[in-house]
Amino acid sequence: EVQLVESGGGLVQPGGSLRLSCAASGFLFSMAGMSWVRQAPGKGPEWVSSISPGGGVTSYADSVKGRFTISRDNAKKMLYLQMNSLKPEDTAVYYCAKTAGGDRGQGTQVTVSS
């Protein structure tokens, strides 16, 4: 059974930083492309970033490019999202997901507010 468990969300002031983590189990993590997706209140899901199985290829939505960094540790079966220079419009529930297959975690809330 695929399990993805996110953590690291919280309340942060504009301009602040957070690091999200995702613990993966139940599948061959090192062979899976992984992504972060977010959903703001009243809006549909928005793709944020993806990373290749080996970690060498990354991609970002224009809205977060230059501020967010995706990374992974295949030995620990962990996915990360470093978020810097946070803006109120980054407020959302952030989900860790397999890029292919649709599996995703329960999400972690990120709120950017003064």
Image (tube, rainbow, N blue to C red):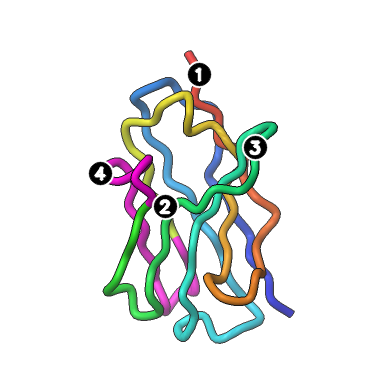
Residue corresponding to mark 4: 66
Kindly state the secondary structure of the residue where label 2 is placed.
strand
Q: Nearer the viewer, mark 4 or mark 2?
A: 4
Q: Is residue 105 left or right of residue 66?
A: right
Residue ID at (45%, 83%): 30
Q: Nearer the viewer, mark 3 or mark 2?
A: 3
Cα separation, mark 1 vs mark 3, equals: 18 Å
At label 4, the amino acid type is Gly
First in sequence: mark 3 or mark 4?
Answer: 3
Q: Is residue 106 left or right of residue 108?
A: right
Residue 17 x, y percent position in the rendering? 37, 34
Cα separation, mark 1 vs mark 2, equals: 19 Å
Kindly state the secondary structure of the residue where label 4 is placed.
loop
The numbered disc on residue 113 is 1
Numbered range of the magenta stretch? 61-79
Q: How many dots with numbers?
A: 4
Cα separation, mark 4 vs mark 2, equals: 13 Å
Mark 3 touches mark 4? (CB < 8 Å):
no
Q: Relative to 114, is 1 above or below?
A: below
Residue ID at (69%, 32%): 42
Residue corresponding to mark 2: 81
Residue 10 x, y percent position in the rendering? 56, 33
At label 2, the amino acid type is Leu
At label 1, the amino acid type is Ser
Of residues 29 and 45, which is closer to you in this image?
45
Residue ID at (56%, 65%): 23
